[in-house]
Amino acid sequence: AQSVTQLDSHVSVSEGTPVLLRCNYSSSYSPSLFWYVQHPNKGLQLLLKYTSAATLVKGINGFEAEFKKSETSFHLTKPSAHMSDAAEYFCVVSRDTGRRALTFGSGTRLQVQP
Amino acid sequence: DVKVTQSSRYLVKRTGEKVFLECVQDMDHENMFWYRQDPGLGLRLIYFSYDVKMKEKGDIPEGYSVSREKKERFSLILESASTNQTSMYLCASRVGGQPQHFGDGTRLSIL
């Protein structure tokens, strides 16, 4: 079965500093991995997806993630945080059964200090 | 852009009531999903549907059922609401191998 572990439940950064949100995954096959973002009282928005085409994936709003098979990691980064980045972030893996339903990590809440 | 619309943003019901949560998508997607979101647990899959009248249980189906009579609409039903079903409920849809698109969620309180 597939699973994801988000290593930090809360991350706080200052505006203009780099962001690192950590995610490890477990999968018995080559997975599809995603990062979603949820702003307060909103649904989930896709930030980026990895589907084996390239290990470094660029997403929206300056975010990117690197797939590292040897470390079973898919960490999300951004060079410079903006106040509008404050939200909850979910690392997600697609299942190989169940019509590709998703398995979610527990989420990381990102705070951005002025 | 895909639009997934959940009929209510906030809903308050009483224990024992039968509750319907509605979800509509406008892109003819064959796959639709219901999740519940609780703090510290991420999203957990309740049920999904891959075609009209076709459904499969997810990870936490107990106390829930679903209905899909038309391709664009997927309903989640709480047969007899209980306080432990107070949660945020999110609907999603997908076509083929594309990522899922989510609605804005329904925050349900059971008193």
Image: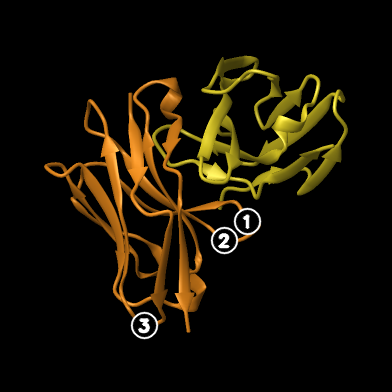
Chain colours: A orange, B yellow
Alpha-carbon span between mark 3 and mark 1? 25 Å
Question: In the rendering, at what x and y percent does residue B79 appear?
Answer: 78, 19
In front here: B74 or B63?
A: B63
Residue displayed at 44% across by 34% down:
A102
Q: What is the crowding at mark 1: few (fewer than 14 residues within 10 Å), some, or many (at least 20)?
A: some
Q: Which residue is mark 2?
A: A39
Q: Which residue is mark 1?
A: A42
Q: Is residue A59 above or below residue A14?
A: above
Mark 3 or mark 2: whose residue is earlier in sequence: 3
The amino acid pointed to by label 3 is Gly
> Which chain hosts label 2?
A
Question: In the rendering, at what x and y percent does residue A4 appear?
Answer: 34, 39
Residue displayed at 44% across by 77% down:
A82
> Which chain hosts label 1?
A
The amino acid pointed to by label 1 is Lys
Question: In the rendering, at what x and y percent does residue A103 appear?
Answer: 42, 34
Q: What is the crowding at mark 3: few (fewer than 14 residues within 10 Å), some, or many (at least 20)?
A: some
Mark 3 or mark 1: whose residue is earlier in sequence: 3
Q: Are marks 2 and 1 on the same chain?
A: yes
Whether tag 3 and tag 2 are in contact, CB under 8 A, the answer is: no
Whether tag 2 and tag 1 are in contact, CB under 8 A, the answer is: yes
Residue displayed at 57% across by 61% down:
A39
Q: Secondary structure at mark 3?
A: loop
Question: In the rendering, at what x and y percent does residue A70 appear?
Answer: 11, 42
The amino acid pointed to by label 2 is His
User: Tag on residue A114?
Assistant: none
User: Tag on residue A16?
Assistant: 3
Alpha-carbon span between mark 2 and mark 1? 5 Å
In front here: B91 or A13?
A: A13
